[in-house]
Amino acid sequence: MQKKFSRILFKNIVTFSGLAIFFALTSCEEDLAKVNDKKSTNFASRIIYNADIVKKDSGMVKVRFKAPLLEEYEFVDTPYVVVRKGLYLEFYDSKKPKTPGKLWAKYAKMIDKKQFYEARGNVKVINNEGQTFAMQSIYWDKAKQRMYTKDTVFITDKDGSIFVAANGMNAKDDFSEYTFYNNSGDFNVKKMPNSGN
């Protein structure tokens, strides 16, 4: 009888051990699946050093872009490109194709899918008319063809006139038209448009 009891006990232990191992392995698989779902995909999929990119349309240069470090993040819901170590950009207008506008910044982020771009850190823009715009950040909504900032903008005209927009500006993306908010400064009255009076 004792032999039969130990055999039943042994079978129960083996069965219980087998079930415990089965559930432990199944549990580990589920945990691994959860871990894999939470893996970060927010890492640079491509890094370009000393980038010098030229974008052309119909044989005409539209943009020339230079940056010491460019990082592309492709494996996220909304892919983007980051420039962390400064950038220089030339943008060409069909009205004055030989005189590019220029932009410098310490940081930039570009989200092509949303057609939204931002530049931050000692941003300086010189349009093809020679006007200089200095600010801490600027945003470009390519779909609406607008550039804007809420930062203080310092504008210097090629004749040396200085103008300050304390509460930012909104501009056409080629800087041919712009609106300044809470502005003041020293400017040439002869260059002001006639108001019709």
Image (cartoon, grey):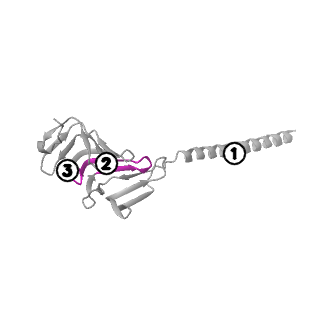
Q: Amino acid at mark 1?
A: Ile
- Can you give x and y, in whole percent of width and height, for residue 166 in the image? 21, 37
Work out whether residue 52 can be spotted. Answer: no
Q: Residues within 10 Å of mark 2 (few under 14, many from 20)?
A: some
Count the marks: how many?
A: 3
Q: Nearer the viewer, mark 2 or mark 1?
A: 2
Q: What residue is shown with label 1?
A: 21
Label number found at residue 131: 3
Q: Residue at x 24, y 52 (%)?
A: 127
Label number found at residue 173: 2
Whether the magenta-drawn stretch holds residue 183 is answered as: no
Q: Residue at x 39, y 55 (%)?
A: 71
- Per the picture, the main secondary structure of the magenta-coloured stretch is strand
Badge 3 element? loop
Badge 1 element? helix
- Can you give x and y, in whole percent of width and height, for residue 32 in the image? 59, 47
Q: Residue at x 19, y 45 (%)?
A: 155
Q: Residue at x 33, y 50 (%)?
A: 108
Badge 2 element? loop
Q: Nearer the viewer, mark 1 or mark 3?
A: 3
Which comes sooner in the sequence, label 3 or label 2? 3
Q: Amino acid at mark 2?
A: Asp
Looking at the figure, which quarter contains the N terminus?
A: top right
- Can you give x and y, in whole percent of width and height, for residue 48 in the image? 38, 60
Question: Distance from label 3 to label 2 (Cα)?
Answer: 14 Å
| Region of the chain picked out in magenta, as a range | 106-131
Which comes sooner in the sequence, label 2 or label 1? 1
Whether the magenta-drawn stretch holds residue 124 is answered as: yes
Q: Amino acid at mark 3?
A: Gln
